[in-house]
Image: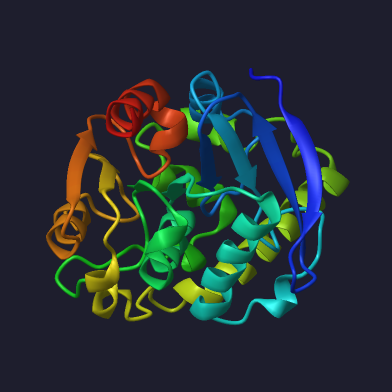
Amino acid sequence: MADYQHRTLETRRGIEFDVREAGEGKDLVFLHGLTGLLEDEPLLDSLSRHFHVLAPTWPGFGVEEGEEKIEDMLDFSLHGLDILDALEVDRPDLVGHSLGGMVAAEMACLQNARIDRLALLAPYGLFLDEDPIADAFATIPFDLPALLFADSEAGQKILTAGFDFTNNEALTNFMVANARRMGTAGKVLFPIPNRRLSKRLYRLSAQTLIVWGSEDALIPSVYGDHWKKRIDRAESVEVAGAGHMLTCERPAEVFEALLKFLG
């Protein structure tokens, strides 16, 4: 595991956030998805050996408060840009996973000049009636591993690492934290993740990489083709044997694709 430093910063809007930081080189900002930043993030470990990795936490996903100030997609996107200001980074590479990928794409549509290259890992943001996205909000926490991982048994171990569910207090804390995360994400993803991003993707001029797990049960891999078609300077990679949590399930393959793209 990389030797991470943790800092608590504050945006100009007054929202505090934790940032996990490691490595040297070009700035790379990683925006996490529905599960937040896990204790063990092998993809970030690998990236930190080549880049200066900065991984902030969204409101509602950490100990810091502020999720009440995030009401819609515009709030999320502007908060992401405020994070870049607080981090004092100049044209970083931006990598977003899941929810973080959706926000990263919106940020690029708003201010292309703020980022260099963009990598989207199984992003939310589009919705196809013929290939609907599974409803994570109707899924009880104990069924999430099967939705997020190709290997649900391994996924359960990853998501519940460090939790003793025979302890009522630990179980309660886990359920409350999960409800808080999903409540924040639901502001832009519920009932369906369609916030008209498709109408704005014509503004996205950054060179973009789309990465998808072939076994994604949450957002079908066919969405990768639709993202690629809507972005002028996009290329795509499909990772075999990976579900939605491809960052944990196939970190080596995702890292290889990112390193080839980002240089």
Residue 127 shows up from this direction: no
What residue is at 21 percent from the left and 37 percent from the top? 238
Q: Position of residue 134 (x, y in %)?
A: 35, 62
As displayed, is residue 132 above or below residue 33? below
Q: Quadrant of the N terminus?
A: top right
* Residue drawn where x is 24% and y is 53% of the image: 220
Residue 63 position by quadrant: bottom right
Quarter the C terminus occupies: top left
Location of residue 164 (image quadrant): top right
Instruction: Please identify the quarter of the rendering in which residue 81 is found.
Output: bottom right
How many dots with numbers? 0
Residue at x 54% of width, y 81% of height: 72
Instruction: Give the residue furthest to the right.
Output: 169
Task: Give residue 40's position: percent from left, percent from top.
Answer: 62, 28
Between 132 and 103, the one lying in front of the other is 103
Residue nearest the observer in this picture, 82 or 198? 82
Q: Horizontally, is 211 left or right of 175 in the view? A: left
Coloring scheme of the render? rainbow
Report x, y in % for residue 212: 27, 43
Q: Is residue 93 left or right of residue 186?
A: left
Instruction: Tell me residue 182's x, y (percent).
Output: 60, 64
233 left or right of 139? left
Residue at 39%, 48% in the rendered image:
116
Q: Determine if residue 255 is in view.
A: yes
